Amino acid sequence: MKNILITGAAGFLGSHLCERFLKEDFYVIGMDNFITGSQKNIDSLKKNKNFRFINHDVSKYVEINDDLDYILHFASPASPIDYLKIPIQTLKVGSLGTHNLLGLAKAKKAVILVASTSEVYGDPLVHPQSESYFGNVNPIGPRGVYDEAKRFQEAITMAYHRFHNLDTKIVRIFNTYGPRMRLNDGRVLPAFIGQVLRGEDLTIFGDGSQTRSFCYVDDLIDGIYKLLFYNYNYPVNIGNPNEISIKDFAQEIIKLTNSQQKIIYKPLPENDPLKRKPDIDLAKNILGWVPKVNRNEGLKLTYEYFCSLSKKELNLKEHQNFKSYNKF
């Protein structure tokens, strides 16, 4: 049985990754400090004898006594409402946290895969975005704390690969959705569905012409799984290239939920990307990976999940842990 450490295990993607690797007969060590993750996401995993959880902040020294074959580094705030409220922690987990885990991978002779993001492309001047594009990022803007943390993460990961000959992988994740997203995390899909369920009008920032490309979580997890075991060390885009404008997406949500809400418009936040569409030719060619879940099917599954939440969860405005971290 192979051992794998998954950081950010109580998060949206981390918890799905834990499930997948348990199904593949791995011994999974999950790590999280619950700054944005949820205990609820891992409650069912704790019943599995091949799962162990460690409550720890990876920005501090990480010590694992077990042998490790693989490390997946998915610890990080991942939405604007998170990294704008906790900017220092966002920078620390992308820099200090990544450094700690690369050091651990080196000591354990483990393969490490780090979660990067389409945000490394910033507000792109190239469309669609391929891995060869270096991006258009404002390093001192409000979103820079996330964008630059991930760009540094990629740089130090490649440095460890080149200097220490460490087997590293980098996945650039585009907009992903599905069960276990937080309704209050600030991303467009949970924001729209949360507004529908609370009987509020749908809020669009800007004129709604900006585009996004949404990948269902099961497809993303499958792409990450394939990348981990493929002999390739440079960044790979994983996402769904089916592009849609935010205005059209809002109409899809209204139709799906059979709601009567109106659409209201507010100013576009600073440095918000106007275009987002992955070029996935590399993933197709080397991994044989393509997304399989169409948006209509994925949205139905996601909406059913959100409908199962309690009224208290639907009205949640702020993550309970943010206040305690503001002092750093």
Image (spheres, rainbow, N blue to C red):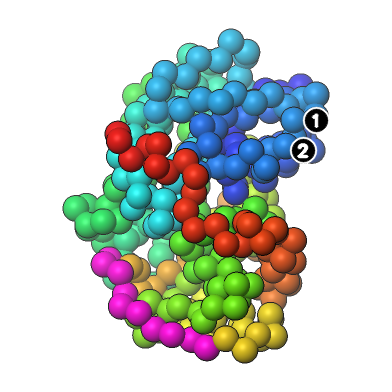
Magenta segment: 262-271
How far apart, in angstroms, are the residues tagged by discs 2 and 1?
A: 6 Å
Say above or below: 311 vs 59: below
Q: Which residue type carries mark 1?
A: Lys
Residue 95 place in picture, x, y as percent: 33, 34
Q: Which quadrant would the C terminus be assigned to in this image?
A: top left
- Say left or right for 32 vs 82: right
Say above or below: 94 vs 134: above
Residue 299 place in picture, x, y as percent: 67, 71
Q: Which residue is mark 2?
A: 44
Q: Residue at x 70, y 58 (%)?
A: 310
Say above or below: 41 vs 159: below
Residue 182 image-quadrant placement:
bottom right
At mark 2, the secondary structure is loop
Residue 52 image-quadrant placement:
top right
Q: Which residue is mark 1?
A: 47
Residue 249 place in picture, x, y as percent: 54, 80
